[in-house]
Image: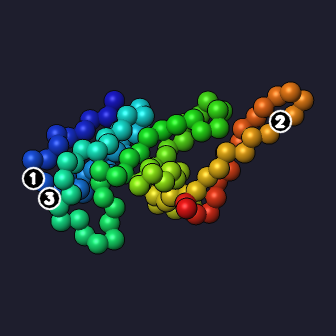
């Protein structure tokens, strides 16, 4: 069980915690905190707009294991850890193969998320 502290009451602290809450919830059970904010005030240039960002888990290749997918502005990327444990986004595609009447899907991880 994951204990999540109460949501702060000041608007300035919401943006810093949105990603943290989303990560905890998506890792804990596939639940996502999406579009929590009704307005976008004082977002610094170069930062994502919170209401256009979501994280969820999804079994992309049908192998029974879920991958973490981040969506921003309609673009989906894998949200992963690099070899040092730092969060990174990676592009992906699903490769479907047909052999002897059987269909299989494989997840191919790309270098960049485009």
Residue 43: % across, % down = 23, 65
Residue located beneath label 1 in the image: 10
Q: How many numbered marks, from 0 up?
A: 3
Tell me if residue 79 can be seen: no
Q: Earlier in the sequence, mark 1 or mark 2?
A: 1
| Badge 1 element | loop
Quarter of the figure with residue 91:
bottom right
Residue located beneath label 2 in the image: 98
Compared with residue 76, is residue 101 higher up or lower down, i.e. above or below? above
| Badge 3 element | helix
Residue drawn where x is 29% and y is 50% of the image? 51
**Colouring chosen for the image of the structure:** rainbow
Compared with residue 111, is residue 23 higher up or lower down, i.e. above or below? above
Residue located beneath label 3 in the image: 12
Residue drawn where x is 34% and y is 30% of the image? 1
Quarter of the figure with residue 98:
top right
């Amino acid at each position: 069980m994951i204990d999540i502290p109460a949501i702060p009451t000041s608007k300035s602290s919401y943006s810093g915690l949105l990603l943290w809450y989303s990560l905890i919830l998506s890792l804990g059970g596939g639940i996502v905190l999406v579009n929590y904010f009704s307005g976008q005030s004082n977002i610094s240039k170069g930062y994502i707009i919170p209401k256009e960002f979501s994280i969820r888990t999804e079994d992309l290749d049908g192998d029974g294991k879920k991958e973490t997918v981040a969506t921003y502005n309609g673009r989906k990327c894998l949200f992963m850890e690099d070899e040092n444990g730092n969060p990174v986004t990676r592009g992906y595609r699903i490769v479907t193969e047909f052999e002897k009447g059987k269909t299989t899907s494989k997840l191919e991880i790309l270098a960049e998320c485009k």
